[in-house]
Amino acid sequence: MTFGRFFLPGPTEVRREVLEAMLRPMMPHRGRDFETLFERLQTGLRAVFRTARPVLVSSSSATGLMEAAIRCAPDGPVLALVNGAFAERFAQIARACGRETNVLETPWGEVAPLDRVERRLAARRYAAVTVVHSETSTGALTDVRALTALARRHGALCLVDSVTGVAGAPLEFDAWELDFVLTGSQKALALPPGLALGVASEAYMRGVRERAPAGRGLYFDLVEFEAFALKHQTPNTPALPLLYALDVQLQTILAEGMEARWARHAAMAQATVAWAESAGAGPGLGVLAPVGARSPTVTALTLPERLQGGAIVAALAERGWTIGNGYGKLRDRTIRIGHMGDHSVDGVRGCLGALEEVVG
Ligand SMILES: *Cc1c(COP(=O)(O)O)cnc(C)c1O
């Protein structure tokens, strides 16, 4: 298969060179060669997250580090900002981990207005706020920098799911003074699924060490993750083939440069929005997320009555193109295009051209 026809908002398309890296032989994960590899991965990952902190590497899907973020957060209630399916999952995880969880609900597609968040934070002392940076079910992008600053003023940590943010949308862990950010391998990093990557601030980690939140468990204990990362190791056997793939992919990402990568994603999103608003898309097609809150990595397109999401996705598949169905309660009324990872603006235009044949 040639590269460039798979626009699912996760897992995303993986280049052959990256897939082939997974064929390397296994190595002991308690030896010098592994430590050299891990150290090299750290250099690349720190550049991706824009941090000097260790980047925690978990051989789990991204949800694993969402659970870790909750389990290790200081004891106390959680305020969950819910504006889509993944934000709702974060709230469910908090409840499942035994946290008293209050929800601030925003219509799907939108982002929580800061003044509404502020009123909730002023009314009650929360241990943590959960938020999704780029809500993959709707294509909405939240300003996590402003949100983290707001949470801090009210004594709460901000836990950021940036699974379709990191490596596609601008994010600066240190400069924005974020508390906790996680991503997964299979979205804007354009790797196969199975790795979760995260960064916790010094303040967050101090909290875990000093207050040892009840029930933080063992497998997702971030104290363990950090202690091993500082020795260039992981607490348990890592998914070595995925680390080999990450190694190759990080070289490509560093060669492109984060600013260029962010600009490419912004341009792919812009091409998608411009097409949706053009005559070619036909009447009634729209972009779900409002101007100013649109993700550069995924766009959810709203459909007019005459069009049905599943039929569009199937017609595109017949033409050799893959895009995403709507997600959750938006399943029939939207379609989603994942313009992230290693795709190009021209590639996205090719996909939109095929889409135009189907809906125009
Ligand atoms: C894909 C995704 C997840 C879940 O990731 P898994 O790797 O399936 O656990 C969580 N949040 C967002 C925003 C996502 O896009």
Image (cartoon, helix red, strand yellow):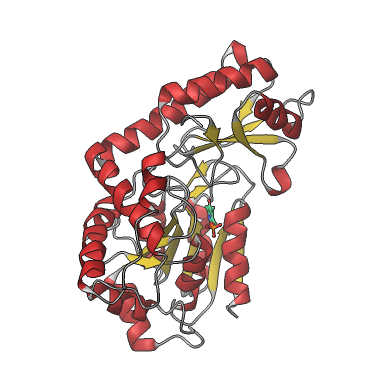
Q: Is residue 106 above or below residue 62?
A: above
Q: Is residue 4 above or below residue 112?
A: above
Task: Say which quadrant the C terminus sits in.
Answer: top right
Name which residue lies at 39% across and 53% down: 23
Name which residue lies at 54% across and 76% down: 77
Write down the quadrant of residue 351 in the picture.
top right
Q: Is residue 5 left or right of residue 16?
A: right
Where residue 304 appears, as percent x and y from the top left, is: 73, 25
Kindly tell me whether residue 189 is visible in this rendering: no
Question: Looking at the image, which residue sits at the far front?
Answer: 25
Q: Is residue 343 left or right of residue 82?
A: left
Where residue 122 appears, as percent x and y from the top left, is: 48, 67
Looking at this view, is 253 or 288 the one in front?
253
Looking at this view, is 327 or 37 the one in front?
37
Where residue 213 appears, as percent x and y from the top left, is: 45, 85
Question: Looking at the image, which residue sits at the far right?
Answer: 306
Where residue 307 appears, as percent x and y from the top left, is: 76, 25
Looking at this view, is 306 or 255 the one in front?
255
Kindly tell me whether residue 257 is visible in this rendering: yes
Looking at this view, is 341 or 154 the one in front?
341
Name which residue lies at 46% across and 39% down: 297
Name which residue lies at 56% across and 39% down: 8
